[in-house]
């Protein structure tokens, strides 16, 4: 991992006032070290960390991703009610879910039009609206 990637990861953690543990620094560098947004699963980040020579357990990856979401650094997108993806792009935007590969990619936000959402029931408020467009190759 490059020093630049580690620096970007450290800055990312500092922006959310997260304590920079060794594991958090390593995972943050993998997530944002190249300056690009990405979608990961806990398993794919675990595999990437192993490939990079980092000693981190899958449970630590799950817990760290959850901490990053709680701190507002990432958002969780759930597909099929059980498969979770984590996105470093915090801007509101839709996603494509590719059924054949099980991958999640950004969809062009400027092409999505939502004119109205239903009113929340009494005693509730809309926290967020996730748009996941499922794709099947033709």
Image (tube, grey):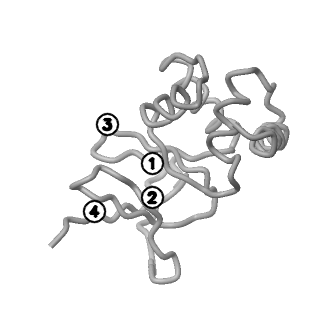
Residue 62 located left or right of residue 8:
left
Which residue is more in the foreground, 21 or 50? Answer: 50
User: SS of the residue at dot 2?
Assistant: loop
- Image location of residue 21, percent across then percent down: 76, 21
* For discs 2 and 4, the disc positioned in front in the rendered view: 4
Which type of secondary structure does the marked residue at label 3 adopt?
loop
Give the spatial CA distance, label 2 vs label 4: 13 Å
Q: Which residue is mark 1?
A: 77
Instruction: Left or right? Give the position of 58 relative to 89.
Output: left
First-in-chain label (4 vs 3): 3
Label 1 vs label 3: CA separation?
10 Å
Disc on res. 82: 3
Q: Judge left or right: residue 9 versus residue 119.
A: right
| Residue count near mark 4 (Cα–Cα under 10 Å), binned few <14, some 14–19, many ≥20 | few
User: Image quarter for residue 131?
Assistant: bottom left
**Residue where numbered disc 4 is placed:** 134
The residues bearing labels 2 and 1 have C-alpha atoms spaced at a distance of: 8 Å
Kindly report which numbered mark, 2 or 1, lies closer to the viewer in this rendering: 1
Q: Viewer-proximal residue, 51 or 125? A: 51
Q: Are marks 4 and 1 in contact (CB under 8 Å)?
A: no
């Amino acid at each position: 991992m490059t020093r630049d990637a580690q620096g970007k990861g450290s800055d990312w953690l500092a922006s959310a006032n997260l304590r920079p543990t060794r594991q958090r620094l390593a995972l943050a560098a993998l997530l944002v070290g190249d300056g690009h947004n990405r979608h990961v699963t806990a398993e794919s980040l675990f595999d990437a960390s192993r490939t990079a020579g980092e000693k981190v357990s899958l449970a630590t990856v799950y817990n760290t991703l959850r901490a990053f979401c709680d701190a507002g650094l990432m958002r969780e997108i759930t597909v099929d009610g059980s498969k979770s993806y984590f996105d470093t792009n915090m801007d509101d935007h839709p996603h494509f879910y590719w059924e054949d590969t099980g991958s999640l990619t950004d969809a062009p936000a400027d092409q999505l039009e939502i004119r109205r959402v239903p009113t929340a029931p009494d005693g509730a408020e809309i926290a967020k609206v996730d748009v996941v467009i499922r794709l099947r190759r033709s």
